[in-house]
Image (cartoon, rainbow, N blue to C red):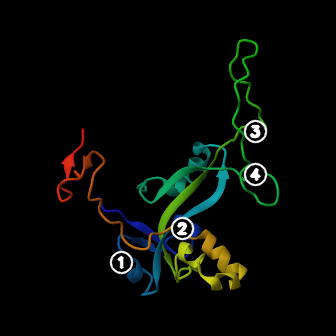
Amino acid sequence: MTLRFPVAPNPDAAVHSPVGFAMREHEARALCGGDEVSFVTAWVGPSAASEDAVRALYAERLAGTPEHWWSILPVAPPGPGKSGRPRRITPARPVFKDGRRWPQPDPETVAHSAWRLNIRYWRVGPDARPTPERAARKLRRDPTAAEMEARELKALADQPLRPDGPQRALDVGLFEMRPPEAPHIIMPDE
């Protein structure tokens, strides 16, 4: 089975009318006439109350397509207020009343999951997200960071955490140790 992903300029076009399907970047670039492409993951369409409702919304388009480029995932619903962030739920405490250990759940504080379609596709065009050239952990120590514009700070906050370099292999496992008298030997620990 080959994993092919849609090629499109935006997520809605990737679901409804992709240019084509490509497995590798050079195939996607050839499909769109040599334009720049980048592999992205994006949310599509409105959220719904259940996974079945999202499936019904996209039933005719996703029928017969392989599930490796799309998935239906739960998302936290937006909270009240201007920020739109999910509401913070305080942990319940045991009450030991009327033969019950835990209180009845309050419908106002119970988080209800919303479901949404998430797709992976080749986006045509330059990468729209401005990404700083330096990692955030190095930038925060820089004295010139105080002079950054709000747009640059927002882009920095939205970028995913990425390592500075490839992860190094661990030289000692979880149940291994180096004896003090011979640190060049790795031996199993009991």
User: Residue type at mark 1?
Assistant: Glu
Amino acid found under the numbered disc labelled 3: Thr
Which-is-in-front pick, marks 1 and 2?
Answer: 2
The C terminus - image quarter: top left
Question: Is residue 13 depicted above or below 48 in this figure?
Answer: below
Q: What count of labels does the image hold? A: 4
* Mark before the other along the chain sequence, 1 or 2: 1
Q: Residue furthest top?
A: 99
**Of 135 and 28, which appears nearest the observer?**
135
> Which one is nearer the viewer's eye here, 42 or 131?
131
Residue highlighted by disc 1: 27
Quarter occupied by residue 50:
top right
- Which amino acid, mark 4? Gly
Quarter of the picture holding the N terminus: bottom left
Question: Residue 133 at what x, y percent from top left?
Answer: 52, 83
Mark 2 or mark 4, which is nearer the start of the sequence? 4
Residue at figure coordinates x 27%, y 45% from the top left: 175
Mark 1 residue crowding within 10 angstroms, few (<14) / some (14–19) / many (20+) = some
> CA separation, marks 3 and 1?
49 Å
Residue to which mark 2 is pinned: 160
Alpha carbon distance from label 1 to label 2: 27 Å
Mark 2: few/some/many CA within 10 Å (<14, 14-19, 20+): few
- Left or right: 139 with respect to 92? left
Cα distance, mark 2 to mark 3? 30 Å
